């Protein structure tokens, strides 16, 4: 249902752009998000975007460095990651939520998402 891509190896200070492609057109009306799981750590919320209005939400650790965007016509969500740090090293997952209600207050709760991609590895070297 969701296919994440764009991960790779980058030096600290560099940039990467992750993409998440959805297989069904209905995903265009879902809230979408990126989560990540670093080695030895719990999965954590990175960024999310609702449908109407296309409000965006970010974890404090990535604010000002990462930008989430969506192209509903293409059923795609992207995560532009700039000024990458070694602490950003993780497997990044995209997720989709069918019910956008209360998204402004619960977007970081992984349990509300119905669909998950397979993950793409981002490695930031120091």
Image (tube, grey):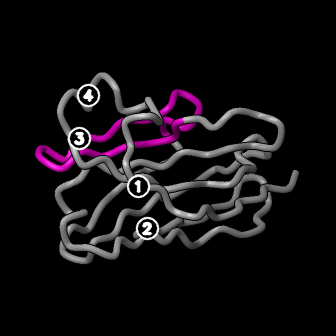
Asked whether 96 falls inside the magenta stretch, the response is no
Query: How far apart, in angstroms, are the residues tagged by discs 4 and 1?
Result: 19 Å
122 vs 2, nearest the viewer = 2
* Residues marked 4 and 3 touching at CB (< 8 Å): yes
Judge the density around disc 1: few (<14), some (14-19), many (≥20) Cα neighbours within 10 Å: some
* Residues marked 1 and 2 touching at CB (< 8 Å): yes
Residue 123, image x, y percentages: 78, 58
Residue 116, image x, y percentages: 47, 56
Which one is earlier in the sequence, the residue at label 2 or at label 3?
Answer: 2
Q: Which residue is label 2 attached to? A: 2
Q: Looking at the image, which residue is at 43% across and 67% down?
A: 2
Judge the density around disc 3: few (<14), some (14-19), many (≥20) Cα neighbours within 10 Å: some
Query: How far apart, in angstroms, are the residues tagged by discs 2 and 3?
Result: 21 Å
Which one is earlier in the sequence, the residue at label 1 or at label 2?
Answer: 2
Circle 3 — which element? loop
Query: How far apart, in angstroms, are the residues tagged by discs 4 and 3?
Result: 8 Å
Query: How far apart, in angstroms, are the residues tagged by discs 1 and 2?
Result: 7 Å
Instruction: Please determine whether, in this image, residue 43 is positioned above or below residue 90.
Output: above
Q: Looking at the image, which residue is at 79% across and 46% down?
A: 86
Which one is earlier in the sequence, the residue at label 3 or at label 1?
Answer: 3
Q: Which residue is label 4 attached to? A: 104
Q: Which residue is label 3 attached to? A: 55
Instruction: Please determine whether, in this image, residue 65 is positioned above or below residue 18.
Output: above
Question: From which residue to which does the magenta span run?
Answer: 45-64
Residue 126, image x, y percentages: 88, 51
Q: Which residue is label 1 attached to? A: 115
Circle 1 — which element? strand
Q: Which mark lies nearer to you, 4 or 1? A: 1
Query: How far apart, in angstroms, are the residues tagged by discs 3 and 1?
Result: 20 Å
Judge the density around disc 2: few (<14), some (14-19), many (≥20) Cα neighbours within 10 Å: many
Q: Which quadrant is the N terminus positioned in?
A: bottom left
């Amino acid at each position: 249902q969701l296919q994440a891509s764009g991960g790779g190896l980058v030096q600290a200070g560099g940039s990467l752009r992750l993409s998440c492609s959805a297989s069904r057109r209905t995903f265009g009306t879902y809230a979408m998000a990126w989560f990540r799981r670093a080695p030895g750590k719990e999965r954590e919320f990175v960024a999310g975007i609702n449908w109407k209005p296309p409000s965006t939400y970010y974890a404090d650790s990535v604010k000002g460095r990462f930008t989430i965007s969506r192209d509903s016509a293409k059923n795609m969500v992207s995560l532009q990651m700039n000024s990458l740090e070694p602490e950003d090293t993780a497997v990044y997952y995209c997720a989709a939520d069918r019910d956008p209600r209360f998204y402004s207050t619960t977007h970081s709760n992984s349990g509300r998402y119905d669909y998950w991609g397979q993950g793409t590895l981002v490695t930031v070297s120091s």
